[in-house]
Image: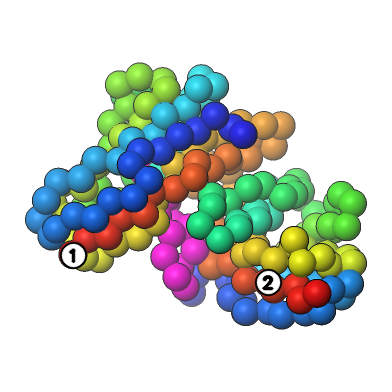
Amino acid sequence: DAGITQSPRHKVTETGTPVTLRCHQTENHRYMYWYRQDPGHGLRLIHYSYGVKDTDKGEVSDGYSVSRSKTEDFLLTLESATSSQTSVYFCAIRGGSANEQFFGPGTRLTVL
Amino acid sequence: QKEVEQDPGPLSVPEGAIVSLNCTYSNSAFQYFMWYRQYSRKGPELLMYTYSSGNKEDGRFTAQVDKSSKYISLFIRDSQPSDSATYLCAIGVDDMRFGAGTRLTVKP
């Protein structure tokens, strides 16, 4: 257990509403990541953070923003949710001897 | 063309079979190669990693990297029903690229 929690675990929302997903880690890792997972696409990087207030875009960042005001928390915000953002969202931290990534349990988001 | 290509399967084998899972990649700069296992409705968990070319063995699992062909493989010997999961290859460190995943079912 890499000490990563995500909240909420499930969410159903309507198109146009703002949504914030939270990732919390207990092990003080510097790097944190947000991915989305869709059938046929695997995991795709949305944004990542390499420290407090230090973030960068990933492969599929359009429509998403992130914030990291504390080492332990990394927030993903959908400013105005669209149906194309229906997905499973995973948070990850980087650690271990090979700088491998450890994943949280995921958040299943449905945008109606 | 995707940076990492992986046959999505599904792949179904009888218990005890040898399983071969494969990925190809396009960026020759990658040095870290990983395999993740993901059970249904769970997050991916790291199974094995290799650095650069060569083989690495861990119990029933062997990871193989051929950088000249840009080809990575995961072999599972004596497969068990508990190995039924989706297997994802992953390449890189910071900007890690994942394959789409291969769904494996091992039938008793």
Does A82 lie within the magenta span? no
* Residue A23 seen from this side: yes
Identify the residue under disc 1. A112
Give residue A11's position: percent from left, percent from top. Answer: 28, 51
Does A41 lie within the magenta span? yes
Q: Which residues are magenta?
A: A35-50
Secondary structure under the numbered disc 2 in the rendered image? strand
Residue at the image position 62 percent from the left and 79 percent from the top: B9
Residue at the image position 31 percent from the left and 55 percent from the top: A109
Q: Amino acid at mark 2?
A: Leu
Q: Amino acid at mark 1?
A: Leu
For label 1, count other residues whose C-alpha is less than 10 Å away and answer few (under 14), some (14-19) or many (20+). some
Figure check: B30 above or below A7: below
Q: Most prominent secondary structure in the magenta stretch?
A: strand
Residue at the image position 83 percent from the left and 67 percent from the top: B79
User: Split into 4 quadrants, where in the image is the C terminus of chain A?
Assistant: bottom left
Figure check: B15 above or below B63: below
For this rendering, which residue is in front, A80 or B50? Answer: A80
Give the chain of mark 2: B
Q: In which quadrant of the rendered view does residue B105 lie?
A: bottom right
For this rendering, which residue is in front, A45 or A112? Answer: A112
User: Split into 4 quadrants, where in the image is the N terminus of chain A?
Assistant: top right
Secondary structure under the numbered disc 1 in the rendered image? loop
Give residue A92's position: percent from left, percent from top. Answer: 49, 40
Give residue A2's position: percent from left, percent from top. Answer: 59, 32
For label 2, count other residues whose C-alpha is less than 10 Å away and answer few (under 14), some (14-19) or many (20+). many
Identify the residue under disc 2. B104
Residue sitting farthest toward the front: B108
Residue at the image position 19 percent from the left and 55 percent from the top: A13
Give the chain of mark 1: A
* Residue A60 seen from this side: no
